[in-house]
Image: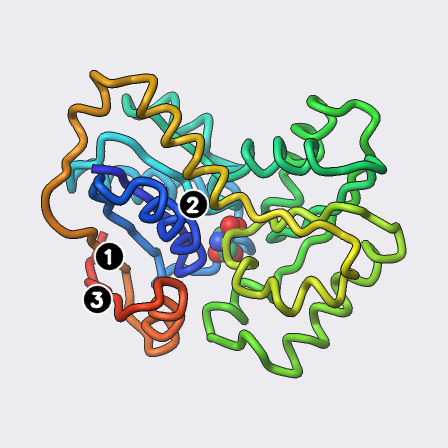
Amino acid sequence: MIGIFDSGVGGMTVARAVEQALPDYRLTYFGDLARTPYGSKSPETIANYARQNTEFLIGKGAKLIIIACNTAASIASEILRNEFNVPIFEVITPAVAKAVATTRSGRIGVIGTRATINSNVYDEKIRHLAPDATVFSQSCPLLAPLVEEGWLNKQETKMILRRYLSPLKKQQVDTLVLGCTHYPLLTNLIQPRIGKRTRVIDSSHEVAADLKAFLAENPEFTAQLSLQGENTYYVSDVTEAALATASQIFGRTIDLIKVTI
Ligand code: DGL
């Protein structure tokens, strides 16, 4: 089974893309709602949460992990690769590849949580692929909590977005990376505020495409993945807002199963 985790509901945007790309394979999701948001926690705490989430999913039978959280990926991808003997996919590398392939001017904006932006990982990975690119980063610590609250179309959310996006708009970025898996839920508010000529990058479909290619290239590994049963969505706390956002992401009612990890 494919294991996917995030600090909350945001990573379900990735789970949905994986479901669409690989409908025959079973997946298990874990959303750490009891401890969200991760973006304002220290790197040590984020790494520990990422470890615990991975252990939980492997305990449930995951043969492969997708870190559907930029914050956890920016801090803990290498740690998890060193500590666990399963393939680890994450959302940052595909987002960077897509941004570099998309930009024409080389002026790339990145928005993410404070921990992701402070880690500098986007900047480093973009410049590695495109040494001439200029990266403009903006941490947006209020956005993931607004999404977890389900404030997807409120005036307050629009105002906060305008505030976060205006420095990037002034820099005339032609590409904007949504460096947090919660942000695709705000795309309809982000696009008009950054400007319609700026391409907004959400890596969920790229992650799913990378995974599909990996499975096709590794048939012996793929044979271990289960095709039977239901996809399961675990959370460390259940809230009304999470249930509503989960249903909105999937377009159907999602049972969130509460677990203590
Ligand atoms: N969805 C996560 C991310 O991609 C984390 C948001 C948070 O918990 O702060 O960064």
Q: Amino acid under label 2?
A: Ala
In the image as oriented, which residue stretches furthest toward the bottom? 155
Callout 1–callout 2 Cβ contact below 8 Å:
no
Quadrant assignment, res 74: top right
Task: For mark 1, give the secondary structure.
Answer: strand
For residue 84, above or below residue 20: above
Check disc 1 and report the residue beneath it.
Answer: 234
Would the CB of label 1 be found within 8 Å of ligand 1? no
The image shows residue 175 at horizontal and vertical percentages of 74, 46
Which disc, if any, is residue 255?
3
Q: Amino acid under label 3?
A: Asp
Task: For mark 2, give the secondary structure.
Answer: loop
The image shows residue 246 at horizontal and vertical percentages of 35, 66
Left or right, 99 with reference to 236: right
For residue 130, above or below residue 253: above
Task: For mark 3, give the secondary structure.
Answer: loop
Q: Which residue is rendered at x = 55% and y = 37% of the image?
A: 92
